[in-house]
């Protein structure tokens, strides 16, 4: 179980490794987004360019 | 069973907003700013992204975050005499590094947890307590630095009738 001020999530042991991998991927994208946003980048453009399309 | 390495990596991520199902989303020492555990679980189609709705952190406050395996406690009303009884008080079942998760029967007005409980839990090495229910003594928990997450804080303690 993981809790912080946003709330609590429960992660079954069987999914931990996949969750870590997904979080890592997403964190790298978010880090780039933060950098560009601080420079004044537009949200819509950044989402298109930095996030993978489904 | 997840490997200790993977568990340690998971510890570094924070909880996150699971409300947008369209959001995309090793080892060691990954980082505290990762907030996408809920998103990841939504992607893996885990119900509600693992989010336990309604409970919030009362102690220690904005800097707090906790991580650990759950020890679950289901409380029943005292009138339920068929439920199993524990050989020791449930708070004495806390273990080093774990988080006790308590389910309190719905609709009961009293707190099932307070400063005394946190004192015992902390001594036993618990990381935190999470309660789907009510607790009290928020300031005591904050003073001792023991993380408490629950539905609401109230002032009325359990009566003898509500002991589990």
Image: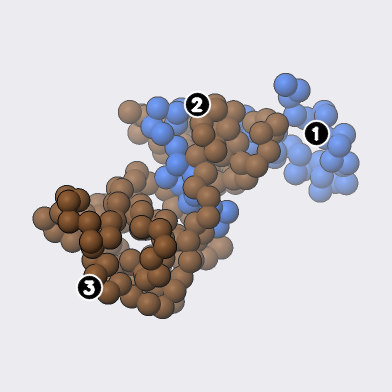
Chain colours: A blue, B brown
Would you say the residues marked 2 and 3 are in contact, meaning their CB atoms lie under 8 Å apart? no
Residue B17 vertical position relative to residue B78 in the rendered view, above or below:
above
State how far apart marks 2 and 3 are (Cα): 46 Å
Query: Do discs 2 and 1 share a chain?
Result: yes
Give the labeled residue for mark 1. Answer: A47
State how far apart marks 2 and 1 are (Cα): 23 Å
Residue B11 vertical position relative to residue B47 in the rendered view, above or below:
below
Label 3: how many residues lie within 10 Å, few (<14), some (14-19) or many (20+)?
few
Label 1: how many residues lie within 10 Å, few (<14), some (14-19) or many (20+)?
some
Give the labeled residue for mark 3. Answer: B160
Total labels: the figure holds: 3
The mark nearer the N terminus, 2 or 1, is 2
Drawn side of residue B123 relative to residue B6, left or right = left
Residue at (53%, 50%) from the top-left corner? Answer: B53
Check the residue under mark 3 and report the chain it is in. Answer: B
x and y percentages locating residue B87 in the rendered image: 11, 55
Asked which quadrant contains residue B23, the reply is: top right
Residue closest to the eye, B75 or B98: B75
Q: Secondary structure at mark 2?
A: helix
Asked whether residue B119 is in view, the answer is no
Q: Secondary structure at mark 3?
A: helix
State how far apart marks 1 and 3 are (Cα): 57 Å
x and y percentages locating residue B32 in the rendered image: 55, 47
Query: Do discs 1 and 3 share a chain?
Result: no
Residue at (57%, 54%) from the top-left corner? Answer: A6
Drawn side of residue B55 relative to residue A47, left or right = left
Quadrant in the picture for the N terminus of chain B: top left
Can you name the residue that lies furthest to the left here? Answer: B87
Which disc, if any, is residue B110? none
Which disc, if any, is residue A18? 2
Drawn side of residue B29 relative to residue B5, left or right = right
Residue at (84%, 40%) from the top-left corner? Answer: A43
């Amino acid at each position: 179980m993981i809790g912080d001020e946003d709330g609590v999530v429960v992660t079954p042991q069987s999914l931990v490794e996949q969750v870590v991998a997904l979080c890592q991927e997403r964190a790298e994208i978010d880090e780039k987004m933060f950098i560009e946003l601080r420079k004044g980048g537009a949200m819509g453009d950044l989402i298109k360019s930095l996030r993978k399309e489904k | 069973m997840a490997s200790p390495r993977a568990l340690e990596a998971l510890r570094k991520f924070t909880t996150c907003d699971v409300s947008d199902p369209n959001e995309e989303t090793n080892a060691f020492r990954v980082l505290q700013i990762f907030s996408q555990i809920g998103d990841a679980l939504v992607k893996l189609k885990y119900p509600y992204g693992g989010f336990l709705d309604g409970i919030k952190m009362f102690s220690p406050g904005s800097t707090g975050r906790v991580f650990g395996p759950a020890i679950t406690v289901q409380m029943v009303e005292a009138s339920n005499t068929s439920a199993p009884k524990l050989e020791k008080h449930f708070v004495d079942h806390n273990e080093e590094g774990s988080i006790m998760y308590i389910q309190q029967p719905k609709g009961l007005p009293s707190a099932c947890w307070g400063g005394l409980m946190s004192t015992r839990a902390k001594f036993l090495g618990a990381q935190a307590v999470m309660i789907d229910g009510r607790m009290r003594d928020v300031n005591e928990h904050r003073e001792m630095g023991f993380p408490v997450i629950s539905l609401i804080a109230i002032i009325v303690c359990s009566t003898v009738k509500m002991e589990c």
